[in-house]
Image: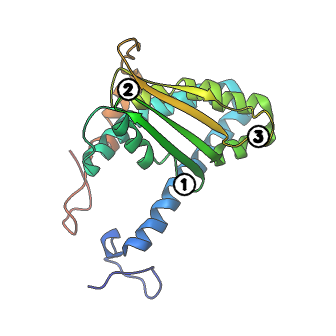
Amino acid sequence: MSERKDYAGPFDPDFRYEDLSKEALVRLVREYALIAHLLDRSGLAAVGMRYGQQVVEEIAIEEWRGASPIYGERIRKIMKIEGDGVPAIFKVLQLDPGFPSHYMDVHYELVDEHHGFFELRSCGALLDVEPYGERAVTGMCHTIEDGTFDVTAQAVNPRARIRHVHRPPRMPADRVPHCRWEAVIDDDTATRHEAGITALTRRTPAARLAFPAMRAGPAAAPA
């Protein structure tokens, strides 16, 4: 069967992702990564309208703590990302749906196994919240990221930490890159215990789902 470059033409009741070409899959993956942000924009906006900015931040942190370590592990497994150094952390970030290509223009600078930097030359999430003022920017770029970046890094190495070099609010207002972060692994880092929301998420069918081999059925089955 020839690969599809798109889904033009008649409806195919047996259609699967395996039918698509690499180029079509890349287009679809980029959209799926952006959809994760659209879900956050709509869901957390609804929370904010009813309960306020502080509750938005609390829920965003719990959401990330619950999901990031689990989907990070799944990505590492399917993409065969080995090791527990900064290169492995950066590989996970490169594939993280929270950093969709083009919406987030992320660049990485690896120093060695225990040290590196990454920066967002442009951050779509920042551009989304800047019109709402400094309180919204600080909530995302300080409160939420301080509560979540280490969770993602420590899912790869419990002695990892991520700290800002600079971050918004932007001064001057057109500053580029929008932010810059340092990743370090050392013995002085305080290790986080797994959050209760992470343990709860691990028990869900989504976290335990094991996909079948390509073109094999059933379509999905919890492990």
Please, what secondary structure does the residue beneath circle 1 have? helix
* Distance between mark 2 and mark 1 Cα atoms: 26 Å
Residue displayed at 30% across by 85% down: 2
Name which residue type carries label 3.
Answer: Glu
The residue carrying pointer 2 sits among few (fewer than 14), some (14 to 19) or many (20 or more) residues within 10 Å by Cα, namely many
Q: How is the image coloured?
A: rainbow
Nearer-the-camera pick, 2 or 205: 2
Please, what secondary structure does the residue beneath circle 2 have? helix
The residue carrying mark 3 is: 130
The residue carrying mark 1 is: 35
Classify residue 40 as left or right of residue 201.
right
The residue carrying mark 2 is: 154
Please, what secondary structure does the residue beneath circle 3 have? helix
* Residue 117, position as x, y percentages in the image: 50, 35
Quadrant location, the N terminus: bottom left
Residue 211 appears in which quarter of the rendering?
A: bottom left
Name which residue type carries label 2.
Answer: Gln
Residue displayed at 44% across by 66% down: 26
* Residue 40, position as x, y percentages in the image: 59, 43
If you read the primary sequence from the N terminus, does the residue marked by circle 3 or circle 1 appear first? Answer: 1
Q: Of tags 3 and 1, which is closer to the observer?
A: 3
Quadrant location, the C terminus: top left
* Distance between mark 3 and mark 1 Cα atoms: 20 Å
Mark 2 in CB contact with mark 1 (< 8 angstroms) = no
Nearer-the-camera pick, 39 or 117: 117
Residue 53 appears in which quarter of the rendering?
A: top right
Residue displayed at 43% across by 73% down: 24
The residue carrying pointer 1 sits among few (fewer than 14), some (14 to 19) or many (20 or more) residues within 10 Å by Cα, namely some
* Distance between mark 2 and mark 3 Cα atoms: 29 Å
